[in-house]
Image (cartoon, rainbow, N blue to C red):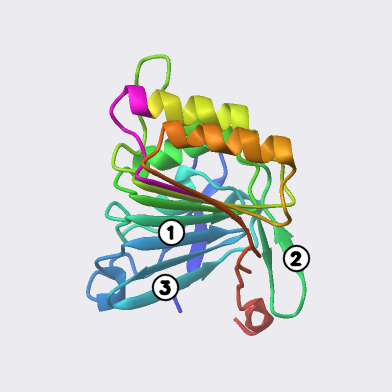
Amino acid sequence: MLKGVFTGEEFDDRGDPAAQLRPSSINHLPVTRRITKAVAIPHSCILSGPNGNIRFWCFEETRARFGAEFFTSFSPISVLEIRHLWVGQHSTSRSGIRHTFPEQTVVDIRNTFRVLAKVEDLTLVSCKTAAFFSTLGVAADDEVLLPGLRRLTIFVGCEYLDVSAFIQCLKARKEQSRSLCEVTVVFEKEPEADLVEAMESLGEFVEELVYRVGEAPKLFWLDEDCDDW
């Protein structure tokens, strides 16, 4: 367990105190090195690699958001080599309590993707996807974020999937030679015929398209133990 403290000496982009880990350097701990995967859910993040997992929990609202400081505040733990990223809008504790992110914004997602620039595999679980599609497309200055992104998986859940925006996103990436190899969309229930027809048109812009019905994974955090921390 690593504890963070709010020193008030440094601030994030919204003027909130930034978390500082103590001790100031933990590079000697093997688990902090070669981090390749992150799972970000409300108020928490799990970083993992071949040396094990590090789990963070924070009750502060500033850490409930999905933003660049959500990851950069973990310094001196390096997140620059993360290849696999999961983002969950909702999470359910083992005790049945549901936690929810504030809706992700284009600015927050863009800044995060600039920090996690090497992500190759992105999974969205029950997220509002509009801001992600806008960010993963091509910006006005022809900037393409996550240039190495190859696989995208979306568990739609109860959220609305804007297929038109999704098509524009994938089309823009293909035109910039950054098309995705695999796209998987998992619906909570059988989609309507018009949605199926719209989904078929996605195949023009990706190498492999899969859509199916299935249950979204439950992203748990062991918060029943937090009262003892």
Question: Badge 1: how crowded within 10 Å, few (<14), some, or many (20+)?
Answer: some
Label 1 or label 2, whichever lies nearer to me, is 2
Question: Badge 3: how crowded within 10 Å, few (<14), some, or many (20+)?
Answer: some
Is there a contact, CB below 8 Å, between mark 1 and mark 3? no
What distance separates the C-alpha of mark 1 from that of mark 3?
A: 16 Å
State the mark number for residue 98: 2
In the image, the segment drawn in magenta is 174-184
| Front one among 141 and 203 | 203
Reply above or below: 92 against 129.
Answer: below
Q: Amino acid at mark 2?
A: Arg
Residue at position x 71%, y 61% in the image: 99
Q: Position of residue 107 (x, y in %)?
A: 52, 31
State the mark number for residue 168: none
What distance separates the C-alpha of mark 1 from that of mark 2?
A: 27 Å
Among the two numbered marks 2 and 3 on one chain, the one whose residue lies closer to the N terminus? 3
Q: Amino acid at mark 1?
A: Gln
- Left or right, 12 with reference to 97: left
Query: Which residue is disc 1 drawn over?
Result: 20
